[in-house]
Image (cartoon, rainbow, N blue to C red):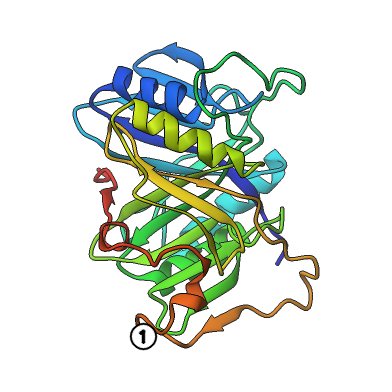
Amino acid sequence: MTHIVHAVGHMKVNVIDPEAVVRDATDILGLGVTHRSGGETWLSSNGRAAELVLVHSNENSAHTIGLEALTADLVEEAASLVEASGCTILSRNPSLDCMAAGVTFSTPEGLRFEIHSPIRHKTYGRRYDTLGVGPNRIDHINLITPNPAATRKQLEQIAGMRLSERLVNDSLSWMYGGNRQHHLLGLVEGTGPGLHHVSFEFLEFNQYLRLGDILDRHGKQMMWGPGRHRPGDNTYAYYTDASGMMIECSGVMAHIADDADFVANVITNLERPGNVRDMNVWGTPAPLEWREYFHPFAKIA
């Protein structure tokens, strides 16, 4: 099966205090506000019309994970595969007017995805004044699911995504798409549907220095990092924003060049602390706060 999904498109979240979340997104991370209306605020790190979408709400929760396909025809193909996978179509219309096509569906585990055509993009509009660090793009999302094997099968069937790496007990796995970076989605086993973190790509290591100092000026600090993950080979640092959502700032990932002959890696050593080197190239082991982090998904009507 071909890759229907090419990359992460956007992350939509419900927030109680949108102004506080906007301040963190602009003054710390360095996103820019691109649109405000109808109870929504859109932010982006580049020329794309939206990467992080804030829905003004009475709760802080994950709303929808947006996955970008390259054409409207691929969106339609994905829509035709939803029901056979055991999932439910919620809408056949794009949720944002900056994209031409979209299909939103829910999984039996309570997750919500939208596969959509490319978001409107200004090729030469990617730089703007910001007090924050200034990442390159949204690059991956880690979700929490009570049934990782089922969620992985759904994403394989509907989105054409493929496994890149997993722990032998399936408590954590990573899936890639058409752009071939090591993962677009990480699947974390948990008791309920949730969001673990949303990641934005850094291109230079000195951006972590700026991030740490900016967090300090805002009375915050990193939850974990900087370090380098073994799966994906990307550098990382994590913090939480005003809504409680965890943000990862991630370096460039390893790429899967030979898609046809690629065999997903299986990590068999699960015992801590002996498996730390299987998960981390360098840096401290993951703290308990990071390992047990949970940001809920909004209940689907």
What percent of the width, then of the height, locates residue 144?
Answer: 35, 59
Q: Nearer the viewer, residue 264 or 232?
A: 232
Secondary-structure class at tag 1: loop
Task: Residue at 58%, 34% (x, y): give it.
Answer: 135
Q: Nearer the viewer, residue 141 or 150?
A: 141
Name the quadrant of the C terminus.
Answer: top left
Quadrant of the image occupied by residue 178: bottom right
- 73 sits to left or right of 270: right
Question: In the visual, does 301 lie left or right of 111?
Answer: left
Residue corresponding to mark 1: 271
Q: Position of residue 253 (x, y in %)?
A: 65, 56
- Classify residue 255 as left or right of residue 167: right
Under mark 1, the amino acid is: Glu
In the image, what residue occupies the spot 56% across and 64% down? Answer: 175
Total marks shown come to 1
In the picture as drawn, the residue positioned furthest to the left comes out as: 58
Give residue 22's position: percent from left, percent from top. 38, 21
Q: Position of residue 179 (x, y in %)?
A: 71, 53
Q: Residue at x 52, y 62 (%)?
A: 155
Q: Is residue 89 visible?
A: no
- The residue carrying pointer 1 sits among few (fewer than 14), some (14 to 19) or many (20 or more) residues within 10 Å by Cα, namely few
- Residue 154 sits above or below residue 89 on the image: below
Please determine whether, in this image, residue 273 is positioned above or below residue 40.
below
Q: Quadrant of the N terminus?
A: bottom right
Comparing 128 with 44, the one in front is 128
Q: Residue at x 66, y 41 (%)?
A: 203
Residue 282 relative to residue 89: left or right: right
Q: Tell me if residue 67 can be seen.
A: yes
